[in-house]
Image (tube, rainbow, N blue to C red):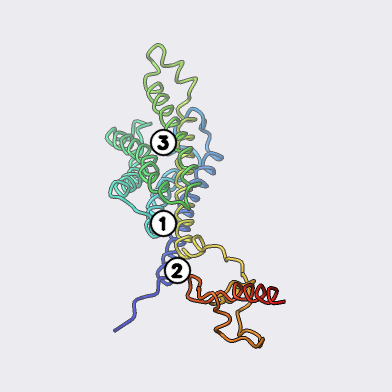
Amino acid sequence: MPSPPSHAKVHTVDVARTRAWTIAAAAGLGWALFTLIVLHSVSSFDPLTDPLSRYAFTDRGGGMLEASLLSAAVGVIAVRGSVLSAGLPLSRTTSTLVYATSTGLATAALFPATFSSDIDPVSGRIHQYASVVAFASLPAIALSLLDVLRATPVLARVASALTWLLRIALVSLALFGVSYVADALAGVPGFAVVAETVPVGFTQRIVFLVDLCLLAVLLVGAMRHARASADPASATAPATAPATAVQPAVTGASPMTPLAGPPADTGRSVAHEAVDGSANGFGYHDVRNADLQRSDRTDAVT
């Protein structure tokens, strides 16, 4: 009968797969961030007021926005692979949110927004809805995994960091929604002031950076859980007890009391020792009482 595979080998393979997925996710997300930084440095658009969608029509750095969004879409899929290979429970809801985020980013890259007359308005609508799906689904991925991280003792600090980032993500997403509506209704009295106070480009970039941080925390949690699962004895092994001297057990006597040996030759018989005919509770004659009684008789005769 073939022997089952070793437990350590299974976990070693999981750690290797988790590391590979983590590297792939870090490469995809890192390249997306690097491309955006280069695009902002070469473009003439204002990063505070112009949304990211406008950079598809930049005078310098054409195609870099699309490359950044596609790279981010691949990175999100790789994050799912890292979490799954680390052994963390992954629900259907989480997987659906991952695919929705990745599809939304890829769709937004393939269908540009309508910032010029030569762009089909349908493409602009698709870009708009795809962006909403991506920006709304990505924080929901972290939220769906929060209880899983909290239930894992080794990921307590990761869960705490993810909680704080989720709060920032929700606040920044709400600000982005307000600024987006205010920018779209800038012609209405009152909304122009809001659009100038909270620029849509600034809030959108905050949301993007916070979302990248959420994904990075999930990658850290996946690697930490994989490494902890690879050697469970290291986290649960009890401390070595100090060596203590083992005292040999003495049967029938205390450590401080010598064993009773045969009585010295005093010329007495066993009948003399049992002169009172009494016995103690263990069935042995009280030798000490017999000696005292014999001493009293000797004094009386003298």
The picture places residue 154, in percent across and down from the top left corner, at 48, 53
Between residue 121 and residue 216, name the one nearer to us: 216
Q: Residues within 10 Å of mark 2 (few under 14, many from 20)?
A: some
Position of 266 with respect to 58 (left or right) is right
Between residue 36 and residue 87, name the one nearer to us: 87
Residue 12 has which mark? 2
Cα separation, mark 1 vs mark 3, equals 29 Å
Looking at the image, is mark 1 or mark 2 earlier in the sequence?
2
Looking at the image, is mark 1 or mark 3 earlier in the sequence?
3
Q: Residues within 10 Å of mark 1 (few under 14, many from 20)?
A: many
Amino acid identity at mark 1: Ser
Judged from the image, the secondary structure of the residue bearing numbered disc 3 is helix
Judged from the image, the secondary structure of the residue bearing numbered disc 2 is helix
Cα separation, mark 1 vs mark 2, equals 14 Å
The picture places residue 219, in percent across and down from the top left corner, at 46, 52
Amino acid identity at mark 2: Thr
Label total for image: 3
Image quarter where the C terminus lies is bottom right
Can you identify the residue that label 1 sits on?
A: 82
Position of 60 with respect to 183 (left or right) is right
Q: Vertically, is 291 above or below 104? A: below
